[in-house]
Amino acid sequence: MTDTAIAWDAYARQRPERRLTNARGETTWFNWTQYPDHGPGAELLEVAAGARVLGLGCGKGANAAHLTVLGMRAVGVDVSAEQLRAARERWGHLSGLELHQAEAIGFMQEPGGVYDAVYSVYGAVWFTDPARLLPAVRERMRPGGRLVFSQRPPVEGCYGCQASYIPRGDEEDPLVVKRWDYGPEVWEQLLVEHGFTDVRAVVLPAPPGPRTIGTLIVQTRA
């Protein structure tokens, strides 16, 4: 097991399960942000029933499960066995859901056809070198397909590859994974440089309340 997989397994054990229903009483839903019942949904992917959609860093599978309920062929990839175990326990009964344990770049470099859309919600696009990941993603997308991802906006002055710490027990050092922090303008530039078009990167403000950090949402086409 890689150090990265160990780190994300530890993260998975600390994260609560998604609620059984959201504020609308729905049992599945798509959430791009770190806040409940906030922001846009699956419509950002601009795909319909029957589309093949890939989630990079799918975590416990809730977003992928929602796409399956909408009639899409949802494929989720995550490096963490713990994340995928939780996904299978809750969503394994959905016949259109396909889950794989792999690192994002390695999975994208394997044969397996193309995708109508690719998404990442605080997932692998944030935690993988874009110079390596973006070309691999574009190769596996149909022309005009949507790539949409979300992550926390960067701290001012802290850009590029950063250390992200995942705590463990009181007697253990935290685990470290790398993440890539860029503002909207840099993401737009990087995506254009790698052949993507129609790029739009914005920071969605946080909902009213004590927390003020918004969500960076990037949308583009292959």
Image (cartoon, rainbow, N blue to C red):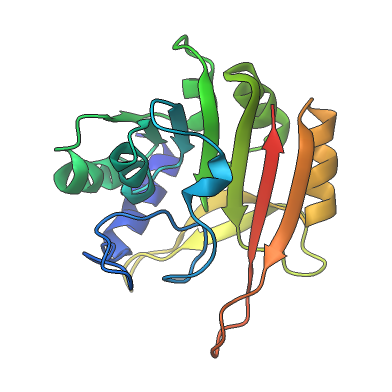
Q: Is residue 162 left or right of residue 141?
A: right
In which quarter of the view is residue 198 placed? top right
Image vertical order of residue 190 relative to residue 41, above or below: above
Q: Name the foreground residue: 30 vs 87.
A: 30
Report if residue 127 is visible in the image: no
Q: Quadrant of the N terminus?
A: top left
Q: Residue at x 77, y 63 (%)?
A: 158
- The number of numbered badges drawn on the structure is 0
Q: Is residue 60 left or right of residue 116?
A: left
Q: Residue furthest top?
A: 111
Q: Position of residue 106 (x, y in %)?
A: 50, 22
Q: Residue at x 79, y 25 (%)?
A: 195
Report if residue 187 is visible in the image: yes
Q: Residue at x 31, y 37 (%)?
A: 68
Q: Position of residue 3 (x, y in %)?
A: 43, 42
Q: Residue at x 62, y 34 (%)?
A: 146
Image vertical order of residue 48 relative to residue 32, above or below: above
Q: Quadrant of the C terminus?
A: top right
